[in-house]
Image: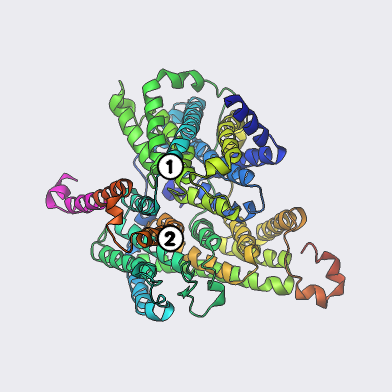
Amino acid sequence: MIQDRRVSDDNEPAATVSDDAAGAGQGRPILIGLAIISIGLLLSVGGQTQTRPEGSGWWNEPALAPTAALLLTFGSAVLGTIFPRRREWLQPAAIRASTRLWLRAFVLATAFLLALWSIAYVGYGIATFLLAATVSFVAGYRGTRLWIMSVVVTLVMVLCFRVILGVWFPEAEIFKLVPLLQPLARYL
Amino acid sequence: MIWDSLAQASAQVLQPAVLVTLVAGCITGIMIGAIPGLGPAVAIALLLPYTFGMEPLSAITLLMGIYAGGWYGGAIPAILINTPGTAVNVLTTYDGYPMTKRGEAQRALSLAYVSSFVGGTLSVLALMLAAPILAQFSKRFGAADLAMAALLAMVLVVTTGRGAKLAATAMLGVGLFIGTIGIEGAFGSPRFIFGQTWLMGGVSLISVILGLFALSQAFVLISETDGVNEINPKLKRNLFSGFVEVFKYPKTLFNSAGFGVVMGVLPGVGEFLAQFFSYSLARKLSKTPELFGKGAPEGIIASETANNAVPAAALVPLLALGIPGEALTAMMLVVFTVHNVDPGPNLFIEHAGFVEGLYFSLFLMNFVIIAILLVATRWIALVARIDTRLLGVCIFCLVMVGTYTTNYRITDPIVAVCFGLFGYALQRAKIPAIPIILGLILGPIVEKRTRQALGSAGGDLTVFIDRPISALFLLIIVVLIVSSIVGYLRSRKPSAMWRN
């Protein structure tokens, strides 16, 4: 991306995000997905909203705003799919490149959620270390740099949020199970 | 009278807490701006949850410092390494980098700083003059007018934005729909909560903002970059040369500031159009248009003055009407809401001290930023060398705290992750995410005001045409939509293809 943002020496704009092989043609699947989801939601409007009490005006109908929003989404997504800015679909090479990037993104998202879930068991500090180490690994760091980076990021986060700002986290199970670690519970 | 106001405002801003946030915001903004790949939106999204515990003036000062500082700092890599620090510094590269190649880096930086300073201070003056007038005028606004004003802001964001307008409209629809989730105001009935009690209060705005702006950027920084920017600034100490030179081009300077202010006030327009128009006009009016793109000082002046004239001016519709015109001021509206400060005409009466303090802090901000830049540019330039993957790791850790500790619910980070992935997909497809935030924030305003207007008119839809202000806004909305459609159809004609 950094390279993509660079402007070439003769001041011709260099490749932009969607100009790269992996990025091209990704708008249409998003719009198709949105159209399908909005149709599904439109069909469930009756079940997911209540009708207004008798005697109140039509403009007070609770379903009015979500229906309008969903119709706008559906209409523009369909039109955007039919009349795209650029008529192109993902090419096989681009799909492969895109799949790699999306796999990475999903690994990162999973690591993020697992780290959050683990806060209740191992505490904020250890969860942050696990997250930092996993994200650093996915980012391409290996060996000593990986560990140094994870430890430094964890220390900075713990120092900022737990020590200086005193942000509260529920006490983790590990501190109840291992009494030796109890003095650290306030910080980790 | 004016001296009393000034004394009161300065007394508020010169409190240690406000001063510290002002300086911290400016430094953070400059640093964030100087790192290619980040931008003020990421920093503001990350810091938003932590500003809720601050006084409103400190919180807004911190966020505005980041907003303004980001645009100043973005000029550094644009000039030194031909890579705009933020998206709005693209045109600065056109003339800044050729000057660096000629060995005039400090001259280019100096021009950028002073132009930014002039744009920034004039923008604050415009805010001070325009906001109270608009607020006074907005006392005449009824519910129908406010509904149409908010609708106009949304239409402007979509029609004047860059890229695919239909996709942007779909994103606006997504934001509007998300804004309707939860317990609605009129009868307290749930909408689209699917039996989930955590959705009764609506989708967490902080989670959406952090997901769309911070997490999505973290995915990009970690997955798609090799992390390192080559930068080797050879800067001498003298960064003062542009102080005089800028004023040799008064037309360019003040035209660009004017464009920046006007575009800043208009919802949804912002920096991109401001810099584009001012750059084009500067080239047209220049005695040496052939030098543009090859290191013309006027090019840097036009781009940087226009960019930096936007932030303070963008606060005009927010303060006067309570209607944010773009994502960054939308995030600031969240701070106002959390502190029970209602922007709009009453703000200038009920919180006059806050408004005066805000003006003073915005004014002071420009002096603080330029002082920091003049002293520390050489070191700030080195920030651009930071491995952006490290920033990605930090963003993940910050989002984890920011989303979880707002409500201590696991669902909020899950929402943030979902929007992070969605934001990543949008970034890759070059679809703007800003309409989602504006739809989410402006949607409830439109719904509430429309209900009020129709309620008072007994459901008669002509209420939106009967009132002159509302009718004017409606007319502008129709013109904007029709001209967008006509423009699109024209661009698809074969003759247009040949021209291209």
The answer to whether any part of residue B89 appears in the image is no
Q: Is residue A164 left or right of residue B387?
A: right
Mark 1 = which residue?
B88
Q: Magenta: predominant secondary structure element? A: helix
Label 2 marks a residue whose chain is: B
- Quarter holding the C terminus of chain A? bottom right
Label 1 marks a residue whose chain is: B
What amino acid is found at the position of numbered circle 2 in the picture?
Answer: Lys
Badge number at residue B469: none
- Picture coordinates of residue B228, whole percent (x, y): 54, 48
- Picture coordinates of residue B267, whole percent (x, y): 39, 46
Is B432 rendered above or below residue B70?
below
Mark 2 = which residue?
B448
What amino acid is found at the position of numbered circle 1 in the picture?
Answer: Val
- B380 magenta-colored: no
Residue at (57% x, 64% y) in the render? A138
- Residue A170 is drawn in which quadrant? bottom right
Q: Is residue A50 left or right of residue B230?
A: left
- Residue B52 is drawn in which quadrant? bottom right
Q: Is disc 2 placed on a helix, strand or loop? A: helix
- Picture coordinates of residue A3, whole percent (x, y): 45, 49
Q: Which residues are the magenta region?
A: B481-500
- Picture coordinates of residue B104, whole percent (x, y): 48, 25
The answer to whether any part of residue A105 appears in the image is yes
